[in-house]
Each structure stands twice: as C-alpha cells, then as structure tokens.
C-alpha cells in the first residue's frame, strides 16, 4: 500500500535503525541522539551548539537540550568564548573523553552488523541516497 511513500518508508526504516543504535548506546547510558552529539563534541572540541545542530541536521533547541543532558551526565562542559563572551564552546570532560574509543568502537560494530544484514552494496547505496535526499530537501 505504501511501498512508494517516502514518508512511510523513511520513518519505518528510522524506527528499525533506532532500535539497533539504542541497544548499542544503552551500555553507555546514552540515547542514540546523545551518543551522536558526544561524538561530534569529541571530534570537534569547542564547537558551538549551533554547529552541532547544523552538522546533525537537528534544531538548535534540540542540540542545546542534548548538550544539557550530556552536561548533566558529566560528559561535556561549556566554556565561554575567548573572542565573543556570548558564545559558549562545548568540550568533552575527562569522563567524556574516556568514552571516545568505546563509543566509536560500538558505532563501528553497529555499522558492520547492518552492512552484513543488508549487504555492503545496498548499505552504501542507501546511506548515500538518503544523504542526497536529505540535502535536496534542506
């Protein structure tokens, strides 16, 4: 009935993939969204919440809420900008840095498992196509 519906298929796929990532990040006490924000902060210490939002394609208030969650967990801290006191950079704490390798390893394992389940060609094609569709709709 909805085989050709972008909305239905993208949401249904999102739910399936969300379950996989939820399982992977549960061991760290993180949701998938929190895990991806932490990965951004680990990769780009000092980033602004607006940069996190832009990179992940989420609303700025959502990025701020997720950063607040990571702050409450002691995984990130905010520091006032040196050139502009209105800006607050987000940095990983020692506890956040300690998760860098384990969370990246867990992420790599999930990606490998998904590649095995659906096949490497379809996996790469699907990710590339979804990226292109997302950019076209932005």
Image (tube, helix red, strand yellow):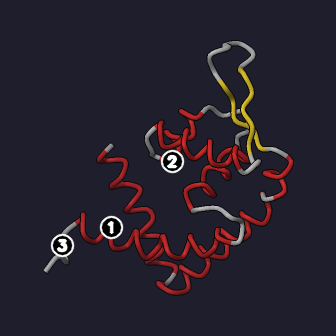
Q: Position of residue 48 (x, y in %)?
A: 62, 31
Within-10-Å neighbours for mark 2: few <14, some 14–19, many 20+? some
Check the image and report above or below for 110 versus 100. below
On the picture, is 26 further left or further right than 116?
right
Residue under pointer 1: 11
Residue at x 17% of width, y 76% of height: 2
Within-10-Å neighbours for mark 3: few <14, some 14–19, many 20+? few
As drawn, the label of residue 4 is 3
Farthest residue toward the front? 72
Using the rendered view, name the quadrant where residue 138 is placed: top left
Indicate the secondary structure of the residue bearing disc 2: helix
On the picture, is 52 further left or further right than 42?
left
Farthest residue toward the left? 1
As drawn, the label of residue 56 is 2
Q: Position of residue 36 (x, y in %)?
A: 60, 55
Q: Along the line of sight, which residue is nearer the eye, 116 or 71?
A: 71
Mark 2 vs mark 3: give the one in front.
2
């Amino acid at each position: 009935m909805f085989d050709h519906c972008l909305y239905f298929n993208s949401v249904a796929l999102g739910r399936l993939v969300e379950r996989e990532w939820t399982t992977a990040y549960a061991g760290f006490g993180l949701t998938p969204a929190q895990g991806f924000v932490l990965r951004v902060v680990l990769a780009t210490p000092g980033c602004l919440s607006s940069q996190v939002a832009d990179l992940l394609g989420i609303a700025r208030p959502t990025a701020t809420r997720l950063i607040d969650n990571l702050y409450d967990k002691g995984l990130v801290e905010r520091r006032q900008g040196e050139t502009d006191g209105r800006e607050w950079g987000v940095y990983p704490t020692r506890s956040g840095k300690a998760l860098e390798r384990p969370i990246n390893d867990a992420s790599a394992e999930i990606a490998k498992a998904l590649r095995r389940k659906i096949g490497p060609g379809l996996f790469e094609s699907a990710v590339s196509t979804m990226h292109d569709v997302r950019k076209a709709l932005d």
